[in-house]
Amino acid sequence: MRSFTLGDFDFALPPELIAQHPAAERSGSRLLDGTAPQPVDRIFRDLPSLIAPGDLLVFNDTRVVKARLYGEKPTGGKAELLIERVLGGHEVAAHMKVSKKPPIGTTLAMQGGFRATLQGRWPDADGPLFRFTLSDDPHALMERHGHVPLPPYIEHGDTAQDAERYQTVFASKPGAVAAPTAALHFDQGLLDLLEARGVHRASVTLHVGAGTFQPVKTENIAEHTMHSEWYDVPAATQQAIADARERGARVVAVGTTTVRTLESWASTGQSSGDTRIFITPGFRFRQVDLLLTNFHLPRSTLLMLVSAFAGYDRIMGLYRHAIAQRYRFFSYGDAMLLARGGH
């Protein structure tokens, strides 16, 4: 099998193709059909014609929380926290952006009048995140005083539009700091059309972390350390997948986060827990037959995942087509539909 290095997953993207705002209508985005022998340009609301009656769509029902919080150190220096995980009680694990790291025990004065006290690193003394104790319930504080944690390539501050549109219409389990973006294209009208066509639906949960945006920095991709994310595959979804297999139907993952969840469950036998699964070309998929996904960052683990799923040459050809046809890229961008193995 071919050996891949980081440079194989690089590509030049014109900056103006990075979507800064969502499409006027969720299902009005473009959809690149990568399941046909040649790429076919479609609109997302065409999706029901590409999904067969009896197929099972699996969504990630995580809900993006307003995880970005601003404050200042006792010295007056600015501080920004991005809460990655609520640990229990008033404790959280967060990314911290400051000019100089404060010592353990420092209390930050946060916008909104609450406090955040630094307890150490997380998950251990050398961990990449910081453990804070907040002065009130973390979920309540984020809802009242937090900001939508838009990706680093979106250049405007969060607005009321972002609070609505950087969230799926069925989001129900709070805990993500990034949206499962392939599912942003679904509105209630499209879900109703799919149901009327006889397409089944199930949900998993994966709380997407900020690590999803981190580029790989090691030329040998096997040396990359994956970030950890919590997932859950409910018993009802396990049964829905078994039923789909029994009737000869396909399992369609909506987004790479759903792929990571289903394949973590398949490879470990654990239906719930933390995953650091790193899917690169050569990975053997056990659960997913079709994948709906947005377009991903160069040199990213998600570009490696879709290359593993549909085939490297196939993906690179689809990306060249998407750039030539001026598709919109990344979280607020357009989508594509892929078949496993590129068939």
Image (tube, helix red, strand yellow):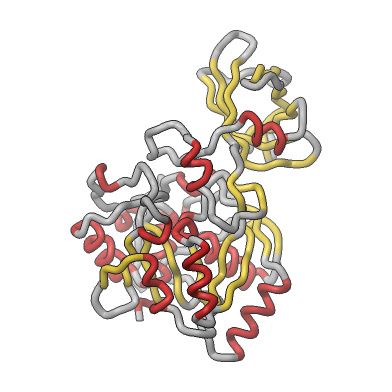
At a point 65% along the width and 58% down the height, the residue shown is 231
Can you give x and y, in whole percent of width and height, for residue 236 in the image?
Answer: 71, 73
Name the outermost residue toward the top. 75
Q: Is residue 286 visible?
A: no
The front one of 336 and 46 is: 46
| Residue 197 drawn above or below residue 47 | below
Residue 295, by quadrant, is bottom left
| Residue 4 drawn above or below residue 51 | above
| Residue 4 drawn above or below residue 106 | below
**Quadrant location of the N terminus in the rendered image:** bottom left
Q: Is residue 289 visible?
A: yes
Can you give x and y, in whole percent of width and height, for residue 51 in the image?
Answer: 44, 79
Can you give x and y, in whole percent of width and height, for residue 235 in the image?
Answer: 73, 72
Badge count: 0
At a point 53% along the width and 26% down the height, the residue shown is 97
Q: Is residue 89 left or right of residue 328?
A: right
Can you give x and y, in whole percent of width and height, for residue 151 in the image?
Answer: 45, 41
At a point 48% along the width and 51% down the height, the residue shown is 224
The front one of 168 and 208 is: 168
Name the outermost residue toward the bottom. 247
The front one of 60 and 196 is: 196
Name the outermost residue toward the left. 324
At a point 45% along the width and 70% down the height, the residue shown is 291
**Quadrant location of the C terminus in the rendered image:** bottom left
The front one of 180 and 170 is: 170
